[in-house]
Amino acid sequence: MGGMVMSAKKLTKREAMFCRYLSVLGDARQAAVLAGFELDAQGAAAELITRDNIMRECEKISGKLARLKISARRGLERLAFGGVGDALGLLFIDEIPEPEYLRNLDLFCVSEIKRPKGGGVEIKFFDRLKALGVLLAHDGHEEMPGAASLYRALEAAAASHKGRDSGED
């Protein structure tokens, strides 16, 4: 019955930190050390992971982390592989479009849009190669044979193409 009372109480700051570290690291002893249970980290970890409220908090945090990872991955995929047609369409518009028109455009890949004083439109996009590199790294492909050299080759090709576009040789 004492365990029920203990598991129903509110988490202390150290216990909450333990839950965060455990959810991220997956190592109860290391989580206990980082949360401030240095004297008997192994014993504290063993006691904490048996408590219902601790495990519920860890599950809640793990769920949030999983959803965040999925959202981040989707965003990176949109940056790496998304279309730029709507943004390029802005290059051919002479007047500033109405806000309603702009709300319907897919400008996710755009980092900046400017209208220089001399006229025209400047559009800067997020770096697709960086997004692709982050996707590869987070999928564990950084150890895949040839992945690093492929990524370097893509970067070199992009730099070479960028140099030609700006008139550099």
Image: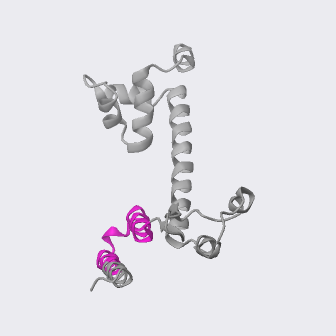
Is 124 or 152 nearer to us in this picture? 124
Looking at the picture, how far across and down is residue 30, in whole percent?
A: 31, 37
Residue 149 in percent (x, y) is at 29, 79
Q: Position of residue 119 (x, y in %)?
A: 53, 69
User: Does the magenta-highlighted stretch encompass residue 143?
Assistant: yes
- In the displayed structure, would residue 97 be above or below residue 8? below
Q: Residue at x 73, y 62 (%)?
A: 101
Magenta segment, prevailing SS (helix, strand or loop): helix
Q: How many marks?
A: 0
Q: Residue at horizontal 33%, vertical 83%?
A: 167
Residue at (40% x, 30% y) in the render: 18
**Camera sees residue 150:** yes
Q: Classify residue 134 as left or right of residue 41.
A: right
Relative to residue 16, is residue 86 depicted above or below?
A: below
Left or right of 72? Residue 41 is left
* On-image quarter of the N terminus: top right
x, y (%) of residue 150?
33, 80
Is residue 78 one of those drawn in magenta?
no
Q: Residue at x 32, y 81 (%)?
A: 163
Q: Quadrant of the C terminus?
A: bottom left
Residue in the foreground of this view, choosing between 96 and 75: 96
Range covered by the magenta-colored residues: 127-155
Residue nearest the viewer, comparing 131 with 107: 107
Q: Is residue 16 left or right of residue 144?
A: right
Rendered image coloring scheme: one colour
Q: Quadrant of residue 14?
A: top left
